[in-house]
Image (cartoon, helix red, strand yellow):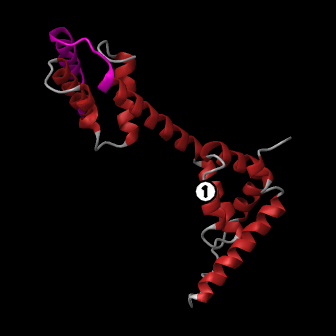
Amino acid sequence: MKYPEYIEELLPLSHFESLIKQSTEEYNEKLAEIDIEPREPLEVEKSEILFFNENFVDILMYFYETFGEDSLYLEEIAFGRGYSVNEVKEHCNLHFRDRFRFKEERLNEKLLEKTRHELATKAWPEGQPAANWWTKKAKEKKDDKNFLIFSENMVKFHLKEIRGSYILDCLKDLPLEEKARIIKEAKNNCEWFIK
Protein backbone atom coordinates (compact mmCIF):
# COMPACT_ATOMS: atom_id res chain seq x y z
CA MET A 1 0.00 0.00 0.00
CA LYS A 2 1.24 3.48 -0.88
CA TYR A 3 1.12 5.99 1.98
CA PRO A 4 1.34 9.77 1.85
CA GLU A 5 4.92 11.05 1.87
CA TYR A 6 4.42 12.39 5.38
CA ILE A 7 3.70 8.84 6.61
CA GLU A 8 6.34 7.17 4.41
CA GLU A 9 9.04 9.29 6.08
CA LEU A 10 8.14 7.76 9.46
CA LEU A 11 7.97 4.11 8.37
CA PRO A 12 8.83 1.45 9.49
CA LEU A 13 8.20 1.39 13.21
CA SER A 14 11.90 0.94 13.99
CA HIS A 15 12.70 4.10 11.99
CA PHE A 16 10.02 6.07 13.86
CA GLU A 17 11.47 4.85 17.16
CA SER A 18 15.01 5.83 16.14
CA LEU A 19 13.80 9.33 15.16
CA ILE A 20 12.24 9.73 18.60
CA LYS A 21 15.42 8.52 20.33
CA GLN A 22 17.49 10.97 18.30
CA SER A 23 15.08 13.81 19.12
CA THR A 24 15.17 12.92 22.82
CA GLU A 25 18.97 12.94 22.84
CA GLU A 26 19.03 16.36 21.14
CA TYR A 27 16.44 17.66 23.61
CA ASN A 28 18.49 16.43 26.56
CA GLU A 29 21.68 17.97 25.09
CA LYS A 30 19.94 21.35 24.91
CA LEU A 31 18.90 20.99 28.54
CA ALA A 32 22.49 20.15 29.51
CA GLU A 33 23.72 23.30 27.74
CA ILE A 34 21.64 25.39 30.12
CA ASP A 35 22.45 23.21 33.15
CA ILE A 36 19.08 21.51 33.47
CA GLU A 37 18.98 17.83 34.30
CA PRO A 38 16.82 15.77 31.94
CA ARG A 39 13.85 14.20 33.63
CA GLU A 40 13.56 10.49 34.11
CA PRO A 41 11.18 8.88 31.60
CA LEU A 42 7.88 7.75 33.03
CA GLU A 43 7.04 4.09 33.09
CA VAL A 44 4.55 3.01 30.44
CA GLU A 45 2.29 -0.03 30.61
CA LYS A 46 3.33 -2.84 28.30
CA SER A 47 -0.23 -2.97 26.90
CA GLU A 48 0.16 0.66 25.71
CA ILE A 49 3.37 -0.21 23.89
CA LEU A 50 1.81 -3.28 22.27
CA PHE A 51 -1.32 -1.33 21.26
CA PHE A 52 0.78 1.32 19.54
CA ASN A 53 3.01 -1.24 17.81
CA GLU A 54 -0.01 -3.15 16.51
CA ASN A 55 -1.84 0.00 15.34
CA PHE A 56 1.17 2.08 14.31
CA VAL A 57 0.12 2.83 10.72
CA ASP A 58 -3.52 3.46 11.66
CA ILE A 59 -2.41 5.91 14.35
CA LEU A 60 -0.11 7.77 11.94
CA MET A 61 -2.88 7.88 9.32
CA TYR A 62 -5.28 9.27 11.92
CA PHE A 63 -2.89 12.10 12.74
CA TYR A 64 -2.31 12.76 9.04
CA GLU A 65 -6.01 12.75 8.10
CA THR A 66 -7.10 14.76 11.13
CA PHE A 67 -4.39 17.39 11.36
CA GLY A 68 -2.83 17.33 7.88
CA GLU A 69 0.80 17.03 6.95
CA ASP A 70 1.44 20.71 7.63
CA SER A 71 0.33 20.32 11.23
CA LEU A 72 2.99 20.04 13.86
CA TYR A 73 0.66 18.15 16.19
CA LEU A 74 2.32 14.73 15.89
CA GLU A 75 5.78 16.29 15.74
CA GLU A 76 5.09 18.12 18.98
CA ILE A 77 4.06 14.92 20.73
CA ALA A 78 6.77 12.74 19.22
CA PHE A 79 9.74 15.05 18.83
CA GLY A 80 9.22 18.27 20.71
CA ARG A 81 9.08 17.44 24.39
CA GLY A 82 11.89 15.01 25.11
CA TYR A 83 9.55 12.09 25.67
CA SER A 84 10.93 8.57 25.57
CA VAL A 85 9.82 6.23 22.78
CA ASN A 86 7.32 4.56 25.10
CA GLU A 87 5.95 7.88 26.38
CA VAL A 88 5.39 8.98 22.77
CA LYS A 89 3.51 5.76 22.10
CA GLU A 90 1.33 6.29 25.15
CA HIS A 91 0.50 9.90 24.18
CA CYS A 92 -0.31 8.92 20.60
CA ASN A 93 -2.57 6.13 21.88
CA LEU A 94 -4.42 8.61 24.07
CA HIS A 95 -5.20 10.87 21.13
CA PHE A 96 -6.04 7.95 18.84
CA ARG A 97 -8.45 6.41 21.36
CA ASP A 98 -10.07 9.79 21.89
CA ARG A 99 -10.57 10.36 18.13
CA PHE A 100 -14.33 9.80 18.13
CA ARG A 101 -14.91 12.40 20.83
CA PHE A 102 -12.58 14.76 19.01
CA LYS A 103 -14.39 14.19 15.71
CA GLU A 104 -17.75 14.88 17.39
CA GLU A 105 -16.32 18.06 18.88
CA ARG A 106 -15.16 19.28 15.47
CA LEU A 107 -18.56 18.50 13.93
CA ASN A 108 -20.27 20.43 16.74
CA GLU A 109 -18.00 23.43 16.16
CA LYS A 110 -18.83 23.39 12.44
CA LEU A 111 -22.56 23.12 13.21
CA LEU A 112 -22.42 26.17 15.50
CA GLU A 113 -20.35 28.16 13.04
CA LYS A 114 -22.71 27.40 10.16
CA THR A 115 -25.81 28.11 12.29
CA ARG A 116 -24.41 31.41 13.57
CA HIS A 117 -23.65 32.46 9.98
CA GLU A 118 -27.14 31.55 8.77
CA LEU A 119 -28.82 33.31 11.69
CA ALA A 120 -26.81 36.45 10.97
CA THR A 121 -27.20 36.54 7.20
CA LYS A 122 -30.40 34.78 6.18
CA ALA A 123 -33.72 36.57 5.79
CA TRP A 124 -36.18 35.10 8.27
CA PRO A 125 -39.93 35.16 8.53
CA GLU A 126 -40.47 37.46 11.44
CA GLY A 127 -43.39 38.63 13.40
CA GLN A 128 -46.05 37.60 15.81
CA PRO A 129 -46.85 34.10 14.42
CA ALA A 130 -43.21 32.97 14.83
CA ALA A 131 -42.88 34.71 18.22
CA ASN A 132 -46.08 33.00 19.43
CA TRP A 133 -44.78 29.62 18.26
CA TRP A 134 -41.49 30.11 20.17
CA THR A 135 -43.34 31.36 23.26
CA LYS A 136 -45.35 28.15 23.26
CA LYS A 137 -42.16 26.13 22.74
CA ALA A 138 -40.53 27.93 25.69
CA LYS A 139 -43.43 26.91 27.94
CA GLU A 140 -43.08 23.29 26.79
CA LYS A 141 -39.36 23.39 27.56
CA LYS A 142 -39.53 25.08 30.97
CA ASP A 143 -37.70 22.10 32.55
CA ASP A 144 -34.85 22.43 30.04
CA LYS A 145 -33.37 25.71 31.28
CA ASN A 146 -30.85 26.11 28.45
CA PHE A 147 -33.38 25.47 25.70
CA LEU A 148 -35.80 27.78 27.46
CA ILE A 149 -33.28 30.66 27.36
CA PHE A 150 -32.61 29.93 23.68
CA SER A 151 -36.37 29.91 22.97
CA GLU A 152 -36.77 33.27 24.70
CA ASN A 153 -34.07 34.70 22.42
CA MET A 154 -35.92 33.32 19.40
CA VAL A 155 -39.05 35.16 20.59
CA LYS A 156 -37.05 38.40 20.89
CA PHE A 157 -35.60 37.87 17.43
CA HIS A 158 -38.97 37.36 15.77
CA LEU A 159 -40.30 40.46 17.53
CA LYS A 160 -37.26 42.36 16.13
CA GLU A 161 -35.87 43.07 19.58
CA ILE A 162 -32.51 41.47 18.74
CA ARG A 163 -30.64 40.66 15.54
CA GLY A 164 -30.09 37.13 14.27
CA SER A 165 -26.39 37.38 15.05
CA TYR A 166 -27.26 37.71 18.77
CA ILE A 167 -29.52 34.67 19.06
CA LEU A 168 -26.75 32.28 20.11
CA ASP A 169 -25.15 34.74 22.54
CA CYS A 170 -27.31 33.31 25.31
CA LEU A 171 -25.48 29.98 24.87
CA LYS A 172 -21.92 31.36 24.94
CA ASP A 173 -21.07 30.11 28.44
CA LEU A 174 -22.40 26.60 27.87
CA PRO A 175 -20.18 23.64 26.97
CA LEU A 176 -19.87 22.99 23.23
CA GLU A 177 -21.76 19.70 23.51
CA GLU A 178 -24.75 21.43 25.13
CA LYS A 179 -24.81 24.22 22.53
CA ALA A 180 -24.81 21.62 19.76
CA ARG A 181 -27.63 19.68 21.46
CA ILE A 182 -29.82 22.78 21.51
CA ILE A 183 -29.12 23.65 17.88
CA LYS A 184 -29.74 20.07 16.74
CA GLU A 185 -33.02 19.97 18.63
CA ALA A 186 -34.09 23.30 17.14
CA LYS A 187 -33.18 22.18 13.62
CA ASN A 188 -34.98 18.86 13.97
CA ASN A 189 -38.07 19.84 15.97
CA CYS A 190 -38.77 23.53 15.58
CA GLU A 191 -40.98 24.94 12.87
CA TRP A 192 -39.47 28.43 12.93
CA PHE A 193 -35.80 27.54 12.69
CA ILE A 194 -33.28 26.78 9.94
CA LYS A 195 -33.24 23.25 8.63
Q: Quadrant of the C terminus?
A: top left
Query: Which quadrant of the structure image shows residue 33?
Result: bottom right
Query: Which quadrant of the structure image shows residue 100?
Result: top right
Query: Which quadrant of the structure image shows residue 142?
Result: top left
Magenta stretch: dominant secondary structure: helix
- Residue annotated with mark 1: 72
Q: Is residue 3 visible?
A: yes
Residue 35 image offset from top left, x and y in percent: 57, 91
On the picture, is 128 further left or further right than 79? left
Nearest the camera: 75 or 59? 75
Does residue 117 sit above or below 77 in this rendering?
Answer: above
Q: SS class of the residue under badge 1? A: loop
Which residues are drawn in magenta? Answer: 120-145
Does residue 117 sit above or below 69 in this rendering?
Answer: above
Does residue 151 sit above or below 189 in this rendering?
Answer: below
Q: Mark 1: which amino acid?
A: Leu
Residue 21 image offset from top left, x and y in percent: 74, 72
Does the magenta run of residues contain 157? no
Give the residue furthest to the bottom: 35
Q: Quadrant of the N terminus?
A: top right
Q: Identify which residue is drawn at 82% across, 63% down.
A: 15
Nearest the camera: 103 or 97? 103
Residue 176 image offset from top left, x and y in percent: 39, 41
Residue 133 image offset from top left, x and y in percent: 21, 13
Q: Identify which residue is drawn at 38% across, 20% down.
A: 187
